[in-house]
Image (cartoon, coloured by chain):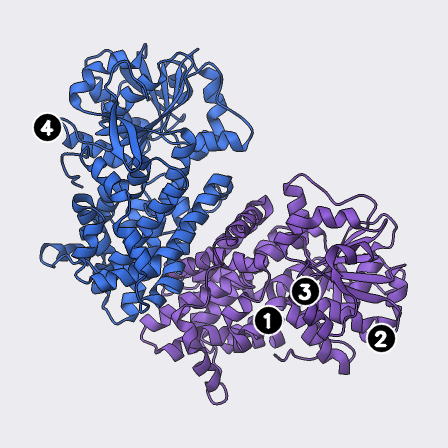
Chain colours: A purple, B blue
Amino acid sequence: MKSSVFRVEQMDVPGGSEDIVRGGRDLFSLLPAALHGVERIGVLGWGPQGRAQALNLRDSLDGTGITVAVGLRPGSRSAEDARAEGFSEVGDWLEVAAASDLVILLIADAALAAHHEEIFAVLKPGATIGLSHGFLLGHLTSIGSAFPDGHPVIAVCPKGMGDSVRRLYQQGATVNGAGINASIAVHADPDGHAWDRALAWSIGLGSPYTFATTLRSEYLSDIAGERAILLGAVHGLVEALYRYFRIEGADPVTAYERSTEAITGPIARTISTDGLAAVRAASGDEELFDRAYSAAYGPARDLVAEVYDEVADGTELRSVILAEQRLATRPMTEIGGSPMWSHSAEVHARRATAAQKIDAVTAGLFVATMMAQVDEFAARGHAWSEIVNESVIEAVDSLLPYMHARDVAYMVDNCSRTARLGTRRWGPRFQAAYEQIALPHLDRPADPALIKGFLGNPAHDALSAAAELRPSVDISV
Amino acid sequence: MKSSVFRVEQMDVPGGSEDIVRGGRDLFSLLPAALHGVERIGVLGWGPQGRAQALNLRDSLDGTGITVAVGLRPGSRSAEDARAEGFSEVGDWLEVAAASDLVILLIADAALAAHHEEIFAVLKPGATIGLSHGFLLGHLTSIGSAFPDGHPVIAVCPKGMGDSVRRLYQQGATVNGAGINASIAVHADPDGHAWDRALAWSIGLGSPYTFATTLRSEYLSDIAGERAILLGAVHGLVEALYRYFRIEGADPVTAYERSTEAITGPIARTISTDGLAAVRAASGDEELFDRAYSAAYGPARDLVAEVYDEVADGTELRSVILAEQRLATRPMTEIGGSPMWSHSAEVHARRATAAQKIDAVTAGLFVATMMAQVDEFAARGHAWSEIVNESVIEAVDSLLPYMHARDVAYMVDNCSRTARLGTRRWGPRFQAAYEQIALPHLDRPADPALIKGFLGNPAHDALSAAAELRPSVDISV
């Protein structure tokens, strides 16, 4: 990572250090210099990320003369919403792409796969291509294609859902910034200013800190992570635990509270404020936590490895594209029909009075799965900032708080189509692993080597280092 | 299909007729003529299919002078078993391949993917390459390769597991044949005798009737079918139903009997003897059956379509090859750890006295899934013989009776690695579809159009036509 405008710092991580740049509203005045000749930013797409990023960039660049335009599919119903949010330049995506110096591609993955050539064809000479995850690189590689020559290609990848990117930015207005950490990547740098433009974009979004990655590495950790601990595994885990507690004799509300409610509430908060090891102590039964952890770590690690292999191989991407083709005639399956969700309102209503308890079995299974992802990502060579952001921080500071407020089904169905499809593919695999392997082995003694590996895991230090740079306000949803 | 030795008949099927050849022990004397110059058959591999086919062919060719040799991986522990079964020619697979006129490749799919080039390199000029399913064609296509020129390439694909192929053959010794139907395909026919060799092989295995397909069509229906109603969907269905009945208040034995026991016992037998529609009447509650059928058909059809797309695309095959690579360091996950299976012995012991009942919910979900596969295969253009054998007959006459005798876990883990891996991938998807969509919708009224489509389905006629040619003895396991 390099910059002629911002200060690049070293963050200590296990085994060395990583380049990072701190964000903050005091840096907004530097954005025009860092954007190097960008006078107009075109944000294509108005999904959760498109909307959040267009709004944050517009607000951060207010008064600089740099404008933000919104490009939409012809006939898109989002035009009205974009205008209502105060955007004056809302138009056809190809026209907006043709008139912008930085074109940020936030349309759906399937649309990107179908239309990237048309968009590339209309770009101004030397216009910067911006991405928020590595999907397009995966797709171009799979079809033997590449980004067009002569254009800077950069990525800024917020480690949280679009709604969080906007919400925390607004909450940070009264302090000097709050937001979602982001990774940045420079895939092509023909004019030498790509890193500064990416940093400006990231700081403009409100990222508390920005770390470096590559498009390939971001793609792998992002797509694999959302299929595992960020979404898929959580969904599978609560489905398995709810039925487990029900069969053990718990009534529906208690089973819900011991499974979903414990994870999205006190477990997420404990990790966010005190780290992973604190959950063990807070569970009230370390011996049971250790047995649950030991029973779940192996099967969870196997599944994370399988997910990772299929993402790296392109198999997962093929399945998404096949699913998108079927969606033309078959709607996406429902994720909210499980009996558990009919008790959400009752559980939420009890929050004011019911004690928020951490069930030791639930905690052991959840933390084991999170650590399985951390360890698998580390074994695959990801940088520590990427590992802890994609495995821990994004979960406890963005996704789980949303699940707590709105429900798992709502949250999943407000993510990208690629994430929604991945949750449907992999959630049931995790559920089966918990039901068929982990839960039946709860009565086995804990594995001392696994527990030692957990308590001494380098992720704790990486997480502490990242925590020093984390949002200064808690997300409110 | 053509033959200069056997009588090709027409079987009436919906919309026309299909070529078939009846089997029978009275035809064994014609096998040498039909094999056209094959003096030595090399069966490579000693898994369930390799063992069963080597034994059946040897017994059928007894006294003809045509010999059957068994080729194994160097150092294989199966050599002893093969010799104990009376084979005198047991040797290194490459040596056996080099010395045989018909080389039947029944080694594991992963071994076939890894070693097919070595095997092809040692073949005699003009030796016939024999397969029992289309996996190798899928693999060769995926790597841009092909079968070697100048060799006949044929397939004989029994529509049942290896143990059934042997068991029914032995049971058929006292009547004029009993066995597992088989499809045959001719992929290359340089000397004009490929169809007769394939028919001789199929009749020698004891197939009651043989129908024609292509390697591609066989591959698609075989791999998709075992991931759906033959194995994957059954496993997912019983996992979902057991927990459903437990949460509804049933004790473990009753929940087992209403789910697994009903499917592997009376439902399978009713379909085998009286057809699919008979299950509805036998359920004792047609109105509830119809509601269950209506709730499950849509999600099951969606999943069968997804499975089919991924098999056709090559995605599923990629995942198998990736899994095989991981198996070098991570053993295959356990499928038998679910709480249900700890009650198998008790349920089996009750068979002598307990009434064997068909639960209407279980029956509706199971038959809906079977029909979803029938309808999806028909929509994809498969021949009716292939559809009913891969969706109904193989299930009720081979796999479900084995599950009834030995248990689901035993049966799955005695199938091919490709089938075992597929069950682990897709079973949980079916489970989630039943739990999240079908079972929560049981209280909705039945869909009259779906029920009409079921009762008037052309599959009933296709099944009746096949039933006239079906084994004259019931399988005993």
The percent position of residue A123, horizontal first and vertical second, equals: 80, 50
What amino acid type should be assigned to the residue bearing mark 4?
Thr
Q: Is residue B392 above or below residue B469?
A: below
For the residues carrying marks 3 and 1, which lies nearer the camera in this image? 3
Real-space CA distance between mark 3 and mark 1, rounded to the nearest whole angstrom:
25 Å
- Taking the spot 41% from the left edge, 29% from the top edge, the residue there is B215
Return the chain for callout 2: A
Measuring from the top left, give residue B71's x and y in whole percent.
36, 22
Q: Quadrant of the C terminus of chain A?
A: bottom right
Q: CA distance from mark 4 to mark 1?
A: 69 Å
Q: Which residue is mark 2?
A: A26
Q: Is residue B56 visible?
A: yes
What residue is shown with label 3? Answer: A46
Q: Earlier in the sequence, mark 3 or mark 2?
A: 2
Q: Secondary structure at mark 2?
A: helix
Q: Is residue A327 left or right of residue A66?
A: left
Tell whether label 1 touches label 3 (CB within 8 Å): no
Real-space Cα separation, disc 2 to disc 4, in angstroms: 92 Å
Chain of the residue that carries numbered disc 1 in the rendered image:
A
- What residue would you read off at disc 4? B174
For the residues labelled 4 and 1, say whether their Cβ atoms are less than 8 Å apart: no
Q: Quadrant of residue B62?
A: top left
**Mark 2 or mark 1, whichever is nearer to me:** 2
- Labels 2 and 1 share a subunit: yes
Give the camera-side residue of A141 and A472.
Answer: A141
Q: Are marks 4 and 3 on the same chain?
A: no
The residue where tag 1 is placed is: A396
Q: Position of residue B386 (x, y in %)?
A: 32, 36
Q: Earlier in the sequence, mark 2 or mark 1?
A: 2
Q: Earlier in the sequence, mark 3 or mark 1?
A: 3
Residue B78 vs residue A329: left or right? left
The chain under label 4 reads B
